[in-house]
Amino acid sequence: MPVIECDVDVARKRLEDQGVTVEPGNTEHERWRASQGDATAVAYENKVVIQGANPRTLEALLREEGGRAHVYFDGGARGNPGPAGIGWVIVTSDGIVAEGSETIGRATNNQAEYEALIAALEAARDYGYDELHVRGDSELIVKQVRGEYNTNNPELREKRVTVHELLRHFDEWTLEHVPREVNSRADELANEAMDQA
């Protein structure tokens, strides 16, 4: 449940400017509430708390633009190909800002890794970060995206193009291969998704 420390009047205007309907709060402590999709933002004295299954869109509208984030991604398949899942985490100096996991149907490990990277980059773009440090435990994917390895598979080549299109949204970015232990939360989320596949 994201909590954003902010001037709640400025936050309200930002939401209204984006076409989000803002209503009065339900209690004397609530300044206002706004809902979008399956998420609700509730404003208190100096903060906004976002509740619901998918708070990302509302949170992105409320957060200040810019800043630096660290992104971790992981994807996998049980069987190759097989039921697949992805996981990703966005971390800033404030800690974990957002994380996600989902099943993606039947895929290979490499397809799942690319899907995880794409989902992570889309989330970071939606949050408005301008500097990104991306880390994953798939050496193949990292080296393909960085241009150190060729991408012979047409489907993976297409996913690599999508990754590069997303990376253009950031002023500065790095992509590095890390051991699985460093990528443990994204790995855990991907495994949770595969458990549900």
Image: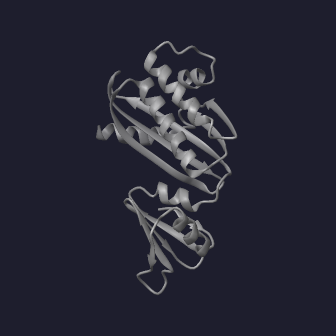
- 8 vs 189, left or right, is right
Is residue 176 left or right of 116 when viewed as pictured? right
Q: Is residue 45 above or below residue 197?
A: below
- List x then y, in percent, for residue 158: 48, 23
Q: Position of residue 53 (x, y in %)?
A: 38, 57
> In the rendered view, would you say 148 is above or below 57?
above
Up the image or down, 8 lies above or below 167; here it is: below
User: Which of 191/121 is in front?
Assistant: 121
Query: With 139 as the anchor, is 189 left or right in this view?
Result: left
Please state which of residues 20 and 192 is positioned toward the viewer in this rendering: 20
Rendered-image quadrant of the C terminus: top left
Residue 138 visible from this viewpoint: no
Percent coordinates x, y for residue 52 in the rendering: 39, 62
State the image quarter where residue 8 is shown. bottom right
Question: x and y percent of residue 42 in the render?
Answer: 47, 72
20 vs 34, nearest the viewer: 20
Q: Residue at horizontal 38%, vertical 23%?
A: 108
Residue 167: image quadrant is top right
Residue sitting at x 41%, y 43% = 101
Residue 87 visible? The answer is yes
